[in-house]
């Protein structure tokens, strides 16, 4: 009897004791379960000081580096135009398919680029949100302003890529939350407004470059030059992702953009620092391979560096693009994945330094000797690994920077704006500046309408059925068609120049019978009203139902 | 002596006579227990030769009246225990101990924070016959488990010494998260690596808790099953010293057939045939086409012969055990060495164990155990390394001949000779023997764990037990690329070290209360647990070492690399749990349990989770009407329902963290910080509910037992590393979304086929069938997954309503034949192909391949979609294989004849497919300089040149040589045409003769003379033969499954070995 009593006691007392103990412990232990990660920053820490905010800015720059972004993947996007393309036409799900307009919606490189653009924009958004909360921000601290200026520049750069490549895209300028992860497309004009606003603010926050400036960080000149590029694109043609037709602004609005381009050019003149590389056109390119900084001509470079050969922050400029180099040569091998349409060799005027620099038709053997190729095979020659002086750290990955904005471009953009606004004299003057530097014969400024048009007519260059050159404006447009090709080829702008001029489809047919042969597959494969844009990655459409299961025209 | 005997015989008769006279009735009482000291309620007691009998009560007590207090014999019997006869001889109290006849019914199994007899349990717990495991000399316990427990699937990723072994209980529930079971070793929550480092012979028992009604007591960690291991301790009695040792030899179980030199050179000719300059190179390398046979027959190197070898293994173990009434102890030291199949690879392991159990008083018991393992694995598996060139693909694809000039011997051994070859894309391959010699890859693993427990009987039947322990594991992986390695040749001599440290502290404190009265038995348990885990990771690297001599042992010899990294990762688990068990009349049993877990890993508002369970069992064989049937010696139905969880995600996933990146700046690197993940405050447990129904049938006094179990196991709020729209700026986010369901059957059959004095034959069959189904994902209906081998393409489909592990690609329907193309008369009556700008023209109605200009002899794939009919594009991809087997299991047979024992173990899997990525990749024989598998030889391959070396151009010429060919021509096997198609998917079913062990134990009367208590000699063969249609090395393979969604890929898997082991064990 006694035992039973005792048992009952225990039976009731113990569980309830345990239970109440549990409740007490739970409450006091909840603090115990809060995580305090020691190897990571939290948002509050990053925005404690300008020094730490700089770390966040570095993070935004990081999104440009590496082979999966500007280091390699970006190389394929501006191909094929009427000048160069990627060798090999068998489908590879990545670079070849992009270059030959045979890409599917699951193209790996397109998917990665889509990802990296957005990842960079998100990092910029996080920075802008955080900076605004800093007390130094309210006080107008100079360092914080510079940081904000650079962040805005980078966001604009990436946003501009987005709308050029994909048209209307999901877009936001706020830090992502789970709820804002699934956005529908935004009209690209809205994105344009944002880009222009960002750059206008950025240019006021950033300083002009000086002789000691690192070109790998944005300056006022970079912001203004990018702004010029954006205006010209906004004034030009584009494929509308909704209607699958080319669209262009009305003439009044276009004229406003051209004027804005000239305003920015004026700022360059007023400042007066930027100009051509003092050592000439050839040395300009050697400088990139030798990692020499030239803030005068280079307005903005995307930086690559690999301490140990790894691909995370490296590029493949001079290995993937450039002449083939034997792996036994001391500079390390180069693959030579790109080919130039050989017909261009004859387009350059006699004496133009750019011809033999832009095009090379030899391989480099194990001893560094040039082994000539047949007259079909030309490589882009602006980047050559045998110019790189450092010992190779990796067979593929190099430290060679990619120049995103160059002063020549500023001049040619201004020339275009002058021409569109009817000031042909000024336009010709600027074109001549670019030609003179390259030792190409210049237009006699006193004989407008004379020699220059001859210079740019067949048989020296091809006849362009798609640019009306009956009047002066047309002649200068033709001149710019060629000049931008000679000067800025393979630098990432040409295909998009042709799109904004509304002539990509035509220009691609120009060399359909190239002596290179069937390896230049663009004339066969290019579809107008489709291939001006890239497809939105299949996975994205599957995951984000707000995209309404609709891809870009034709995909 | 003789006299004495006579005297006894005489005396015996006298006595008998006296007894006869003195016969009288008497009452005998007593208690019946089993060898574990547990009562045998319901045991029957019969007076021999009569109908008189009784049944023991719930405490195993009995009372019986015997007709003769001297000569009556009592027969004690109980299901699952050996029947025993005892002559009364005037005793008033006869207590008996019945030995187990079948482990199945009376074995003590672990149920989590406690133990129970199998006959009493209500959930689903499977146990391994550790005696069988002991006999199999393998270096890892987990591999020995393969096929021995129903519902448990053990897969080694490949055949190398450092292969990842994954153990899955009932398929595993999560989609992208860890599916590893929880390991509890001696009451301490441990780790897979600690489990793997155990010696099979040190294990007392392994119990696997399979259903949620059993695992719910482990709460948030129980969803993938719980493996409870108890190691051996000392036993009371004489101290024993024993030695166990073995010596083994192994070789490669199967080689892949590759081209010999002659076939290779012919292929190279074919590849170069369409290009004059390439053809010139051919002549320089290999001479004239006509002389191929003369120059290359019986020459060349098969690199598998050079890289795989006969390898040896040895193991020594010394074990000391003993004990007195109040203290038992055991300690052992083991040393193992095993050479790897691949040259320059091997493993060494030392293990020290100590276990002590002390009974301080009747009420207090303490125990302590210590375990230290030091293990080093050298060399590496073949599936690691870049996605483009795994080691195995090198071994297969490295050319079998250098050319005319160098000899095979030079090719093999001289690193200075052109041992690097380059393809058109500049990708380099290297002589695999040189790679093995100059690429050092060492993995050092040290695990120390120690713990102890204190058990106090506070009041009668009320016990308190505190189990505490600590674990420290350090793993150091070092990679060094020496001077002649491919990596160093292209850059500089370099190396890196990764250091991973894990520490764990755990304490659990449990109160148990047992109460028993008549037919009622009640057991209550309540407890608390706290586990803290920390992880420290450090990585360093250096480049430009001057030479190979000191290497990583002095990192400062090289230039420091930037790869150095460091991170911390801590987590805490805090838990409270309780369980109640009630047993009525040994017929009806109920268990309810609940656990509350708090984990630091989850969102602020979701740190705590509740995991309840309930189960019920009915031992029908205790019912009179079943007993009367006389069929069943055991009949039991078990029903269980419960919830368990999965918290197997990295720490800090609920927070918005900024982590470091490197940014190039001024020809250097500057640190940057980026928001690394989207914060998710609501992150919570993955919850897993199981309904389980199990039956235990026993026949012929348990000589045959059959235990089928059916289950439906559903996981909700799956912790998915879910794909986000990339436009969010993030790729993944840990979210609780999606559901999966596993349902299936486990079956175990144990049978004692023959048993008599000299011979005993027993069999165990385990069989598992599991069906997996995805109920929902994170919003999307399906997505494609990339397992990430050489073809960096999506190769798996994850889709709602279907199972995990579906291979995705094109369905191969054959090759394009000549009559698929338009032909025309060439003007002289010969049919030739009509060409369009150098391209063949397909006839109307024949589907083309998007972006490929097909030629005769190209792969032809099924055209399925209506949207773009006539063109085979990405939309024509479909499911082409399923990695989940229909069933898998094992069959073990043991024969004991006198002192000889023989066991024969087979395991099998049926109905699963393998994506043979190695075959697909090494069949890219359009690539210059690369060798390929023999299955692509000219007998199977569509060839493009005739026996005269001239290209085949007309339909007739092609047909004459290519009819019935099954493999595409070289031009479609170029590196650019990397297509995943069903030619690369193969049936992975197999039946493996996994182990045969033959042993002989010396008779005791001989061993006694040399002061040896026991001496056993044995010989054992592992992986003797595998019946399979699979053409790769081995059908048990899965090398690219880090996400859990891409099982069954054979990408460069290391071949498996066949081994023979000779060993002995002596106990003094």
Image (cartoon, coloured by chain):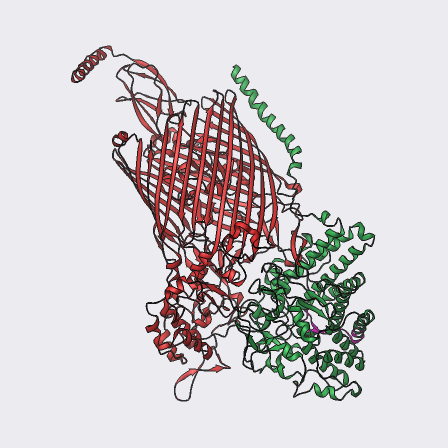
Chain colours: A green, B red
From what the image shows, is residue A299 above or below residue B368? Answer: below
Give the residues drawn in magenta, as a range: A237-254
Question: In the image shown, does A217 or B1050 lie closer to the viewer?
Answer: A217
Q: Quadrant of residue A512?
A: bottom right
Indicate the position of residue A50 as horizontal and vertical percent values: 76, 52
- Asked whether, in this view, residue B368 is left or right of residue B42, the answer is right
- Asked whether, in this view, residue A306 is left or right of residue A228, the answer is left
Q: Quadrant of residue B669?
A: bottom right
Q: How many marks?
A: 0
Question: In the image shown, does B209 or A376 lie closer to the viewer?
Answer: A376
From what the image shows, is residue B778 above or below residue A13? Answer: below
Indicate the position of residue B973 as horizontal and vertical percent values: 46, 69
- Asked whether, in this view, residue B51 is left or right of residue A496, the answer is left
Q: Residue at x 78, y 50 (%)?
A: A134
From what the image shows, is residue B549 above or below residue B46? Answer: below
Is residue B916 in view from this perspective?
Answer: no
Is residue A486 in view from this perspective?
Answer: yes
Q: Is residue A239 magenta?
A: yes
Indicate the position of residue B486 as horizontal and vertical percent values: 49, 61
Question: In the image shown, does A367 or B185 lie closer to the viewer?
Answer: A367
Indicate the position of residue B876 as horizontal and vertical percent values: 51, 66
Q: Is residue B321 magenta?
A: no
Quadrant in which the C terminus of chain A is drawn: bottom right
Question: In the image shown, does A233 or A299 lie closer to the viewer?
Answer: A299
- Asked whether, in this view, residue B23 is left or right of residue B984, the answer is left
From what the image shows, is residue B319 above or below residue B856? Answer: above
Q: Residue at x 37, y 64 (%)?
A: B409
């Amino acid at each position: 009897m006694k035992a039973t009593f005792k048992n009952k006691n225990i039976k009731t007392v113990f569980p309830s004791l345990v239970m109440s103990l549990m409740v007490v412990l739970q409450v006091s232990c909840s603090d115990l379960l809060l995580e305090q990660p020691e190897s990571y920053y939290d948002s509050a820490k990053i925005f404690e000081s300008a020094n730490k905010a700089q770390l966040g800015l570095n993070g935004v720059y990081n999104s440009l580096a590496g082979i999966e972004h500007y280091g390699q993947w970006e190389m394929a996007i501006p191909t094929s135009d009427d000048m160069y393309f990627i060798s090999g036409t068998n489908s590879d799900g990545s670079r070849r398919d992009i270059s030959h307009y045979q890409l599917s919606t699951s193209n790996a490189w397109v998917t990665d680029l889509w990802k990296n653009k957005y990842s960079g924009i998100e990092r910029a958004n996080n920075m802008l949100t955080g900076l605004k909360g800093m007390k130094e921000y309210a006080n107008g601290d100079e360092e914080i302003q510079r940081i904000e200026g650079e962040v805005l520049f980078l966001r604009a750069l990436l946003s501009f890529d987005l709308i050029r490549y994909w048209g209307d895209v999901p877009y936001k300028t706020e830090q992502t939350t789970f709820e804002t992860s699934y956005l529908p497309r935004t009209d690209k004009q809205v994105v344009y407004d944002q880009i222009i606003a960002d750059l206008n603010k950025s240019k006021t926050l950033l300083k002009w470059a000086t002789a000691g400036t690192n070109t790998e960080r944005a300056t006022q000149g970079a912001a203004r030059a990018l702004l010029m590029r954006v205006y010209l694109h906004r004034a030009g043609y584009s494929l509308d992702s909704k209607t699958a037709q080319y669209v262009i602004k009305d003439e009044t609005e276009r004229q406003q953009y051209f004027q804005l381009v000239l305003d920015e050019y004026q700022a360059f003149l007023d400042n007066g620092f930027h100009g051509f590389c003092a050592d000439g056109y050839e040395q300009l390119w050697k400088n990139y391979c030798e990692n020499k900084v030239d803030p005068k001509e280079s307005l903005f470079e995307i930086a690559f560096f690999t301490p140990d050969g790894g691909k995370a922050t490296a590029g493949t400029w001079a290995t993937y693009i450039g002449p083939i180099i034997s792996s036994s040569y001391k500079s390390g091998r180069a693959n030579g994945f790109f080919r130039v349409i050989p017909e261009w060799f004859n387009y350059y005027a006699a004496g133009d330094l750019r011809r033999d620099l832009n095009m090379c038709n030899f391989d480099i053997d194990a001893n560094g000797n040039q082994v000539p190729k047949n007259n079909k095979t030309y490589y882009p020659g602006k980047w050559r690994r045998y110019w790189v002086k450092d010992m190779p750290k990796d067979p593929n990955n190099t430290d060679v920077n990619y120049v995103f904005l160059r002063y020549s471009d500023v001049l040619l953009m201004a020339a275009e704006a002058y021409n569109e606004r009817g000031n042909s004299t000024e336009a010709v003057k600027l074109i001549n500046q670019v030609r003179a530097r390259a030792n190409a014969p210049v237009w006699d400024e006193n004989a407008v309408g004379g020699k220059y048009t001859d210079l740019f007519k067949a048989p020296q260059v091809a006849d362009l059925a798609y640019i009306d050159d009956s009047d002066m404006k047309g002649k200068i447009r033709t001149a710019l068609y060629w000049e931008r090709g000679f000067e800025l080829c393979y630098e990432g702008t040409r295909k998009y120049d042709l799109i904004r001029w509304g002539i990509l489809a035509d220009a691609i047919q120009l060399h359909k019978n190239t002596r290179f042969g069937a390896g230049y597959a663009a004339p066969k494969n290019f579809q107008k009203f489709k291939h001006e844009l890239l497809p939105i990655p299949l996975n994205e459409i599957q995951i984000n139902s707000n995209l309404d299961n609709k891809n870009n025209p034709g995909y | 002596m003789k006299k004495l005997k006579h005297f006894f015989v005489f005396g015996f008769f006298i006595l008998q006579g006296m007894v006869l006279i003195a016969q009288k009735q008497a009452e005998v009482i007593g208690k019946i227990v089993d060898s574990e000291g547990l009562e045998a309620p319901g045991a029957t007691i019969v007076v021999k030769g009569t109908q008189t009998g009784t049944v023991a009560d719930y405490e195993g007590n009995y009372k019986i009246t015997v007709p003769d207090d001297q000569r009556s014999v009592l027969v004690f019997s109980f299901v699952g225990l050996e029947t025993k006869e005892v002559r009364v001889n005037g005793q008033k109290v006869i207590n008996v101990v019945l030995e187990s006849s079948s482990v199945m019914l009376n074995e003590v199994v672990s149920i989590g924070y406690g133990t129970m007899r199998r006959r009493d349990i209500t959930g689903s717990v499977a146990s391994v016959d550790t005696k069988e495991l002991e006999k199999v000399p393998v270096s890892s316990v987990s591999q020995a488990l393969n096929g021995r427990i129903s519902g448990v699937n053990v897969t080694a990723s490949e055949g190398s010494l450092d292969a990842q072994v994954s153990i899955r209980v009932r398929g595993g529930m999560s989609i992208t998260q860890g599916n590893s079971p929880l390991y509890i070793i001696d009451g301490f929550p441990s780790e897979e690596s600690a489990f793997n480092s155990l010696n099979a012979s040190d294990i007392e028992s392994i119990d696997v808790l399979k259903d949620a009604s059993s695992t719910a007591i482990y709460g948030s960690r129980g969803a993938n099953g719980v493996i409870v291991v108890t190691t051996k301790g000392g036993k009371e009695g004489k101290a024993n010293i024993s030695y166990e040792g073995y010596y083994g030899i192994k070789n490669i179980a199967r080689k892949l057939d590759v081209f010999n030199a002659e076939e290779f050179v012919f292929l190279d000719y074919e590849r170069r045939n369409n290009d004059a300059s390439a053809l010139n190179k051919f002549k320089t390398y290999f001479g004239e086409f006509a002389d191929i046979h003369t120059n290359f027959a019986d020459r060349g190197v098969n690199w598998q012969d050079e890289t795989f070898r006969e390898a040896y293994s040895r193991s020594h173990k010394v074990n000391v055990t003993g004990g007195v009434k109040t203290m038992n102890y055991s300690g052992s030291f083991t040393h193992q060495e095993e050479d790897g199949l691949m040259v320059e690879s091997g493993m060494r392991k030392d293990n020290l164990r100590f276990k002590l159990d002390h009974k301080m008083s009747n009420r207090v018991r303490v125990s302590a155990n210590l375990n230290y393992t030091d293990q080093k694995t050298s060399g590496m598996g073949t599936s690691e390394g870049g996605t483009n060139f795994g080691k195995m693909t090198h071994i297969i694809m490295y050319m079998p001949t250098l050319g005319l000039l160098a000899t095979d011997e030079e090719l093999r051994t001289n690193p200075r000779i052109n041992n690097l070859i380059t393809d058109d894309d500049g990708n380099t391959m290297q002589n695999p023997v040189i790679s093995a010699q100059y690429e050092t890859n060492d993995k050092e693993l040290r695990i120390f764990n120690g713990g102890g427990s204190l058990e106090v009987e506070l009041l009668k039947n009320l016990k308190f037990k505190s189990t505490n322990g600590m674990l420290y594991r350090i793993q150091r992986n070092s990679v060094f690329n020496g001077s002649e390695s491919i990596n160093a040749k292209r850059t500089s001599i370099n190396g890196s070290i990764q250091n991973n440290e894990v520490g764990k502290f755990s304490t659990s404190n449990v109160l148990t209360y047992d109460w028993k009265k008549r037919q009622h038995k009640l057991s209550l348990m309540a407890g608390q647990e706290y586990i803290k885990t920390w992880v420290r990771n450090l990585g360093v690297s250096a480049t430009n070492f001057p030479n190979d001599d000191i290497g990583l042992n002095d990192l400062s010899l090289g230039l420091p690399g930037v790869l150095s990294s460091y991170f911390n990762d801590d987590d805490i688990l805090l838990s409270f749990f309780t369980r109640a068990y009630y047993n009525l009349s040994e017929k009806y049993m109920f268990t309810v349990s609940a656990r509350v877990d708090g984990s630091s890993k989850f969102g602020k508002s979701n740190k705590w989770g509740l995991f309840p369970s309930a189960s019920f069992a009915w031992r029908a064989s205790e019912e009179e009407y079943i007993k009367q049937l006389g069929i069943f010696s055991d009949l039991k139905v078990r029903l269980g329902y419960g919830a368990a969880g999965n918290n197997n995600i990295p720490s800090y996933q609920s927070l918005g963290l900024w982590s470091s990146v490197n940014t190039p700046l001024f020809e250097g690197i500057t640190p940057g910080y980026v928001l690394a993940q989207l914060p998710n405050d609501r992150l919570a447990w993955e919850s897993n509910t199981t309904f389980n129904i199990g039956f235990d049938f026993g026949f012929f006094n348990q000589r045959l037992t059959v235990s089928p179990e059916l289950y439906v196991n559903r996981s909700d709020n799956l912790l998915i590393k879910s794909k986000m729209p990339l436009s969010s700026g993030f790729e993944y986010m840990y979210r609780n979304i999606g559901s999966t369901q596993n349902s299936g059957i486990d079956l175990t059959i144990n049978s004692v086929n023959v048993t008599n004095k000299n011979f005993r034959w027993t069999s165990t069959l385990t069989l598992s069938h599991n069906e997996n189904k995805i109920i929902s994902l994170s919003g999307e209906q399906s997505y494609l997954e990339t397992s990430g081998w050489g073809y960096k393409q999506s190769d798996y489909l994850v889709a709602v309503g279907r199972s995990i592990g579906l291979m995705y690609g094109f369905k191969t329907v054959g090759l394009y034949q000549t009559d698929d193309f338009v032909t025309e008369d060439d003007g002289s009556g010969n049919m030739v192909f009509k060409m369009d700008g150098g391209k063949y023209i397909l006839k109307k109605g024949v589907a083309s391949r998007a972006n490929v200009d097909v030629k005769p002899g190209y792969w032809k794939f099924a055209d399925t979609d209506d949207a773009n009919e006539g063109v085979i594009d990405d939309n024509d991809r479909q499911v082409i294989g399923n990695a989940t087997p229909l069933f898998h299991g094992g069959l073990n047979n043991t024969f004991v004849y006198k002192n000889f024992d023989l066991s024969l173990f087979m395991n099998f899997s049926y109905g699963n497919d393998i994506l043979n990525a190695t075959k697909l990749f090494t069949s890219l024989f359009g690539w210059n300089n690369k060798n390929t598998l023999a299955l692509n030889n000219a007998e199977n391959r569509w060839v493009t040149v005739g026996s005269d070396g001239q290209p085949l151009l007309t339909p007739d010429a092609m047909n004459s040589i290519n009819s019935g060919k099954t493999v595409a021509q070289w031009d479609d096997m170029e590196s650019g045409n990397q297509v995943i198609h069903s030619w690369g998917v193969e049936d992975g079913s197999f039946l493996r003769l996994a182990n045969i062990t033959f042993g002989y134990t010396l008779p005791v009367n001989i061993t006694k003379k040399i002061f040896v208590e026991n001496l056993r000699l044995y010989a054992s063969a592992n992986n003797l033969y595998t019946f399979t249609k699979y053409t790769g090395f081995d059908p048990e393979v899965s090398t690219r499954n880090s996400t859990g969604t891409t099982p069954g890929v054979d990408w460069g898997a290391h071949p498996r070995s066949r081994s023979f082991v000779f060993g002995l064990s002596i106990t003094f």
